[in-house]
């Protein structure tokens, strides 16, 4: 790193350090060592935490003049145990921590706190020290009201030591200010050789974690308070803290000396040069593996089997890399597709940077195509060459799971694979016979609307680059445009062109569009110019988005090749379809679903690809003869990309796994299915989850061998080289969450705004990002931004100036689809550009939100899962040193546990990621999903059954037999159900449907009021219909009941 970069990095780091120091003064105190507070600012209301009140008192503090308060009492010795065990969690009267020793050794103990005079609120510092061996439980009466208690217990040859500091006063009502202990702390030094770690009971169940995190040890556990521990020379220092903190290292990407990862250079290398260049990866990786093997003897014997397994997995990865290199440099089509992918990604990165610069500064800079692959991205592409190129290759049936921390570049890695496959598909076809390569090539699925729309914008930039390359050489890359479609449901995008036209007109008339907005691209992905309703154009069959910048390539040349209306997507089956997983449930309801999987009969130059056996061979349009071409089925999607795999869990995951059967079946071509790629930053139990979702084995990449800190492709960086993300915890027993929120936000806002000289170093900390577990909690804070936080901010500000209005936004499910891009754009505005002061968000922000300038987050309560916590907090500190402050609720045992063990948790967060639950063939999943799945698979496969009235044509045949076998075989791969059981359930659906088809005069799939009393076979779960024989089917995979009825079965003998 050059000197200017170091200076810039240190400037931001110094700014964060200042914020941390000032925050501690505002929250715990003292702001000044011998401070005298004004009568309007009493210490109890000024300082949020770090206080011990008399035992039995309430949390309020009043003056003697106002209430008749009983005289204070000092607790006797017998009351101390009662205080420690029975104190009301609302009122902290004691705090301390425990640690373990292998032998009794001298300890240096220091206890300190502050007291405030009742009259002047003048602070007095109190310190107490002792040194020596403490062989047994002992108690010291300190200066009133302090009591120090030490408990020593011998267990199995080790000594369990606990220290507590107590407020010795006892009161049955309100305490005085002078009775409260502030800034309480216990600090102990002990010989390093004597301290021993707490062992985790979980280690015996997960040897893999024990191996990878054996460098992380817990040496102390707090009791009602956080605890920090560190080693200096031959001493171990343990101290309580009301603001426990841990700096989590940043991951750095490994580079290989001599390896050229430039996308432009890779696109231009000869095959021999490319082989020599890429072979450096294999050589370096093997050398790293040899180093790991040399550490084998330092690993405990019982963990050797785990090391061996990890080494086998790495050996398999290396073999796949070698195979990928061989395939690229020996096969001309693979080589040209690899060149295509590199060229496309280079252009995409250059144009995207230029577009972002224009959006943020208004400066129109010439794109620079100097993009390079990160090592893991390039390797991931090489690993997947065989699997995506050869349908019969064994890698085709392996789900490749890209496991990398958030912000590491996973999206670019799988977009690179997608670009390679798109190019290869064109090379395998005939350029002027579009039916030989057209159709959906890549199917990308996400779980959240926000993530889907954001990735759509990023993927559209890649498609624009691919289309730009294609137009330069259509003889090679085909006459059919590369394109992309956003397929996410009518709440966000229109289903039909007529709906889109109406919504577009509403926008032009200045009216708000509440749902189904076709304007999902707010800016041109190529140049960054803003897009308006006037840039969106629709005719009877298609859609065009024309950039408003006349100098932009996509202001002409057919416009931006992106579709945001379902009808257009079905008509023109774009190269990439981006959708939400829950929309797969439409398989039973929408006859056009199968068209995404290549079910087409004709190509019409005006209408696109048509699925109609009776479509005319020509038409006269504007006195011109328009020829149509009869075609066979288009090639179905060959690559499935599932981002954020950890979110496919619970009821949504179970139903998704069931409906994945249909996707896999419809993607079958020449007897082979699609390649599947998944990505995540947080997951546990991936083997079982993938097996139940896709019925396939999983290959995780990359794989750490002996240490979670280094997997070869990335490694943790020492703080001296690069600052990490700084985590702090705040917990104040007896203080409401509302006061927690007001004081925390006011302190963070005041610290930055109190800085005398503003410069760019304050920008990452100007906007406070708040994360909430529920919308209800968020709503309460939103009201406080209007009144209480500004009042508190005035009190803390340097010039006592009141800020009347704080600029704030929220990012929640309450936001309309069209508003989300606007909020994200506002979040990118810097402090000197009318930046947001506060952004409040729910779990919507935990995936896919990439705003580099954000540097500080407040987390309201420990999220329900560690995965959610990791994902959410990684949204800050990506470009600049980040700060995360978690507000814990002392009344929630899980929150309190995380607070008391803050350091050990944050030093190994990924270790605590919970396994995901997927039960695709459990009884609940089958009851809710099987009917819709079976009906949908048959309807989309059999051309005679696709029409809405085609349900009457059902008869058991070879198609139904094949589908039954496909479903039953997949089900038998899980432990939930066997072949015969699921086959019987499917046959029952067949018999029911056939019986209805034989006895009804007309039969449709769903109820349509316009058809009168025509019978139908399906209904929604909450739909009321006169057809009592109709079976319920899901419209969305998110349609899961919030409550279930539980019936207890008792067997009496």
Image (tube, rainbow, N blue to C red):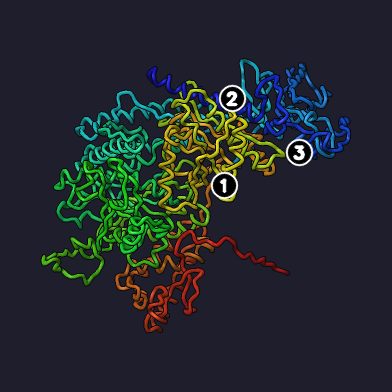
N-terminal label among 1 and 2:
2
Regarding residue 890, the answer to whether it shows in the image is yes
The local secondary structure at tag 3 comes to loop
Q: Is residue 1042 above or below residue 380?
A: below
Q: Quadrant of the N terminus?
A: top left
Which residue is denoted by mark 1 in the rendering? 778
Regarding residue 707, the answer to whether it shows in the image is no
- CA distance for labels 2 and 3: 28 Å
Residue 80: image x %, image y %?
83, 32
- Picture quadrant where residue 1035 is located: bottom left
Front one among 288 and 540: 540
Q: Is residue 228 left or right of residue 159?
A: left
Residue 127: image x %, image y %?
75, 19
Front one among 1021 and 641: 1021
Q: Residues within 10 Å of mark 1 (few under 14, many from 20)?
A: some
Q: Residues within 10 Å of mark 2 (few under 14, many from 20)?
A: few
Q: Is residue 210 left or right of residue 945?
A: right
Q: Residues within 10 Å of mark 3 (few under 14, many from 20)?
A: some
Residue 1000: image x %, image y %?
40, 83
Q: Quadrant of the C terminus?
A: bottom right
Q: Verify CB contact (< 8 Å) between mark 2 and mark 3.
A: no
Which residue is denoted by mark 2 in the rendering? 21
- CA distance for labels 1 and 2: 27 Å
N-terminal label among 3 and 1:
3
Which residue is denoted by mark 3 in the rendering? 60
Residue 541: image x %, image y %?
25, 62
- Please count the marks in the image: 3
Q: Is residue 123 above or below residue 428?
A: above
Q: What numbered label is drawn on residue 388?
A: none
């Amino acid at each position: 790193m050059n000197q200017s970069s170091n200076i810039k990095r240190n400037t931001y780091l110094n700014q964060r350090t200042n914020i941390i120091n000032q925050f501690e003064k505002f929250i715990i105190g003292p702001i000044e060592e011998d401070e005298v507070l004004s009568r309007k600012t009493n210490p109890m209301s000024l300082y949020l935490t770090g206080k011990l009140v008399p035992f039995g008192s309430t949390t309020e503090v009043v003056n003697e003049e106002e209430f008749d308060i009983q005289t204070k009492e000092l607790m006797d010795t017998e009351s101390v145990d009662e205080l420690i065990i029975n104190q009301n969690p609302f009122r902290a009267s004691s705090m301390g921590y425990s640690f373990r020793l292998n032998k009794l050794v001298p300890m240096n103990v220091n206890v300190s706190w502050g007291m405030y005079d009742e009259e002047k609120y003048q602070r007095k510092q109190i310190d107490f020290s002792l040194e020596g061996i403490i062989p047994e439980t002992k108690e010291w009466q300190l200066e009133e009201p302090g009591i120090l208690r030490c408990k020593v217990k011998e267990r199995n040859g080790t000594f369990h030591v606990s220290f507590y500091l107590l407020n010795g006063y006892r009161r049955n009502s309100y305490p005085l200010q002078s009775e409260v202990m502030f800034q309480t702390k216990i600090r102990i030094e002990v010989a390093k050789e004597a301290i021993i770690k707490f062992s985790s009971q979980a280690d015996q169940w997960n040897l893999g974690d024990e191996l990878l995190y054996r460098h992380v040890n817990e040496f102390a556990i707090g009791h009602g308070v956080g605890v920090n521990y560190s080693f200096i020379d031959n001493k171990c220092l343990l101290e309580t803290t009301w603001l426990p903190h841990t700096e989590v290292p940043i991951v750095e990407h490994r580079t290989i000396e001599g390896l050229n990862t430039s996308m432009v250079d890779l696109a231009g290398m000869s095959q021999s040069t490319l082989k020599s260049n890429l072979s450096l990866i294999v050589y370096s990786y093997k050398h790293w593996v040899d180093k790991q093997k040399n550490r084998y003897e330092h690993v405990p014997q019982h963990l050797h089997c785990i090391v061996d397994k990890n080494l086998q997995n790495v050996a398999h990865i290396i073999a796949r890399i070698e195979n990928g290199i061989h395939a690229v440099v020996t096969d001309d089509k693979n080589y040209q597709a690899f060149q295509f992918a590199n060229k496309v990604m280079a252009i995409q990165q250059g144009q995207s940077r230029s577009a972002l610069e224009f959006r943020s500064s208004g400066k129109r800079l010439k794109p620079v195509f100097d993009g390079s692959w990160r090592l893991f991205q390039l390797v991931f592409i090489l690993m997947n060459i065989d699997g995506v190129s050869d349908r019969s290759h064994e890698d085709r049936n392996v789900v490749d799971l890209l496991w990398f921390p958030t912000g590491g570049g996973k999206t670019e890695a799988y977009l690179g694979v997608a670009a390679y496959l798109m190019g290869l598909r064109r090379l395998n076809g005939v350029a002027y016979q579009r039916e030989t390569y057209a159709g959906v090539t890549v199917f990308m699925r996400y779980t959240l609307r926000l993530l889907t729309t954001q990735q759509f914008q990023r993927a559209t930039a890649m498609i624009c680059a691919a289309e730009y390359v294609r137009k330069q050489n259509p003889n090679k890359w085909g006459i059919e445009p590369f394109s992309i479609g956003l397929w996410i449901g009518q709440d966000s995008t229109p289903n039909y062109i007529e709906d889109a036209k109406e919504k577009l007109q509403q926008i032009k008339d200045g009216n708000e569009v509440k749902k189904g907005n076709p304007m999902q691209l707010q800016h041109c992905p190529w140049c960054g110019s803003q897009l308006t309703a006037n840039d969106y154009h629709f005719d009877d069959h298609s859609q065009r988005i024309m950039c408003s910048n006349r100098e932009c390539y996509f202001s002409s040349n057919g416009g931006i090749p992106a579709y945001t209306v379902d009808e257009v997507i079905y008509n023109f089956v774009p190269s990439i379809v981006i959708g939400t997983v829950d929309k797969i449930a439409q398989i039973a309801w929408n006859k056009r679903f199968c068209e995404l999987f290549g079910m087409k009969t004709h190509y019409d130059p005006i209408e696109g690809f048509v699925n109609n056996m009776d479509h005319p061979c020509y038409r006269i349009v504007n006195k011109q003869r328009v020829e149509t071409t009869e075609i066979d089925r288009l090639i179905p999607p060959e690559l499935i990309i599932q981002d954020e795999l950890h979110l496919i869990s619970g009821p949504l995951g179970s139903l998704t796994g069931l409906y994945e059967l249909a996707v896999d079946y419809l993607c079958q071509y020449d007897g082979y299915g699609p390649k599947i790629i998944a990505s995540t930053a947080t997951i546990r139990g991936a083997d079982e989850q993938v097996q139940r979702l896709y019925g396939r084995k999983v290959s995780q990449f990359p794989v750490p061998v002996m240490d979670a800190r280094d997997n070869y492709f990335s490694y943790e960086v020492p703080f001296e080289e690069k600052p990490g993300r700084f985590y702090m915890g705040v917990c104040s027993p007896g203080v409401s969450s509302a006061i927690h929120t007001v004081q925390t936000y006011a302190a963070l806002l005041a610290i930055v705004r109190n800085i005398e000289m503003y410069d760019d170093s304050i920008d990452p900390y100007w906007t406070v990002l708040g994360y909430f577990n529920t919308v209800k909690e968020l709503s309460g804070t939103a009201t406080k931004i209007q009144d209480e936080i500004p009042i508190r901010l005035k009190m803390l500000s340097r010039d006592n100036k009141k800020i009347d209005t704080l600029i704030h936004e929220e990012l929640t499910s309450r936001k309309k689809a069209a508003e989300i891009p606007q909020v994200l754009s506002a979040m990118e505005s810097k402090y000197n550009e009318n930046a947001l002061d506060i952004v409040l968000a729910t779990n919507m922000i935990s995936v896919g939100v990439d705003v580099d300038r954000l540097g500080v987050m407040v987390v309201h309560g420990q999220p329900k899962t560690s995965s959610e916590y990791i994902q959410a907090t990684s949204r800050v500190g990506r470009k600049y040193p980040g700060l995360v402050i978690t507000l814990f609720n002392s009344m929630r045992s899980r929150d309190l546990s995380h607070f008391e063990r803050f350091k050990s948790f944050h030093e190994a967060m990924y270790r605590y990621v919970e396994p995901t639950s997927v039960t695709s063939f459990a009884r609940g999943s089958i009851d809710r999903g099987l009917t819709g799945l079976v009906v949908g698979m048959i309807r989309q496969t059999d051309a005679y059954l696709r029409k809405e009235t085609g349900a009457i044509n059902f008869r058991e045949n070879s198609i139904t037999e094949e589908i039954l076998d496909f479903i039953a075989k997949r089900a038998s791969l899980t432990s939930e159900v066997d072949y015969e059981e699921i086959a019987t359930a499917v046959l029952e659906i067949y018999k029911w449907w056939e019986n209805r088809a034989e006895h009804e005069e007309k039969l449709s799939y769903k109820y349509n009021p316009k058809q009168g009393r025509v019978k139908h076979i399906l209904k929604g779960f909450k739909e009321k219909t006169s057809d009592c024989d109709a079976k319920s089917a899901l419209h969305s995979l998110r349609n899961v009941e919030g409550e279930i009825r539980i019936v207890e079965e008792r067997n009496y003998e």
